[in-house]
Amino acid sequence: MTPIRVPVRLVGMKRIHILGRKNHGKTTLLVELVEHLSAQGLRVGTIKHTHHAHELDTPGKDSHLHRQAGASVSGILSRGMNAVFWSPDSDAGDRYDEFAPHFASCDVVLIEGDVQAAAPKVEVWRAAVAEGLPMAVEDAGILAVITDDPVNVSAPVWPRSDVPTIARGILELLDG
């Protein structure tokens, strides 16, 4: 008798999206937040969202060949790093739910990008490289703007130069 396989979906990953246009400092801020929150004893996960379609696994390598042959999930296990590759379920409502089992031990997950996400979002904005207004002007789903520049938005403004304040604000958003 063949056992019935029931898919398990874990949801509830505590995540926040760090948004901003190109060269506004998303990656730099995310790295600083990881360092700060980790130093506070929190387990921090990160996900980089991209809207570009490209191959993440190296074509021609074994794990890529496994996936091409039909494996629904393919992994790489090494002494220094592990990775899992899978094709996304196009019918999934919130595709981040697919990541939840891998991030279950994290206190917070910082996601770089994804303006379409139905999750808490904050925006990094710098006047020096801006080609317009902050996204928060038109997107009420952005809960705070992170900048050291004067800006006219209805969302709270957190000083970019104050990482502890930003970290505290993010944790309050996620706990609220």
Image (cartoon, helix red, strand yellow):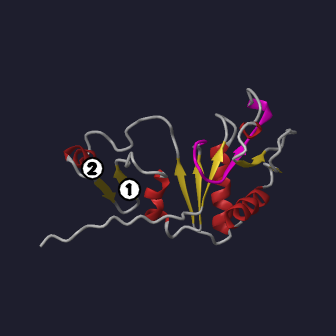
User: Residue at horizontal 19%, vertical 71%?
Assistant: 3
**In the rendered view, does 83 fall on the left or right side of 154?**
left
Callout 1: few (<14), some (14-19), or many (20+) C-alpha neighbours within 10 Å?
few
> Which quarter of the rendered picture does the C terminus lie within?
bottom right
Q: Is residue 23 above or below residue 78?
A: above
Q: Is residue 100 above or below residue 65?
A: below
User: Residue at horizontal 55%, vertical 55%?
Assistant: 46
**In the rendered view, does 31 fall on the left or right side of 150?**
left
Give the CA separation, mark 1 to mark 2.
Answer: 10 Å
Return the x and y of residue 106 as percentages of the image width and height.
55, 67
List the residue tagged with mark 1.
83
Q: Which residues are magenta?
A: 115-129
Return the x and y of residue 88 as percentages of the image width and height.
38, 48
State yes or no: residue 124 in magenta: yes
Return the x and y of residue 4 as percentages of the image width and height.
23, 69
**In the rendered view, does 156 fall on the left or right side of 80?**
right
Q: Secondary structure at mark 1?
A: strand
Q: Are marks 1 and 2 in contact (CB under 8 Å)?
A: yes
State yes or no: residue 32 in magenta: no
Q: Amino acid at mark 2?
A: Ser
Q: Secondary structure at mark 2?
A: helix
Q: Tell me which label, 1 or 2, sits earlier in the chain.
A: 2
Q: Which mark is residue 63?
A: 2
Q: Is residue 125 above or below residue 80?
A: above
Q: Is residue 155 above or below residue 138?
A: below
> Which quarter of the rendered picture does the N terminus lie within?
bottom left
Q: Quadrant of residue 78?
A: bottom left
In depth, the one of 85 and 2 nearer the eye is 2
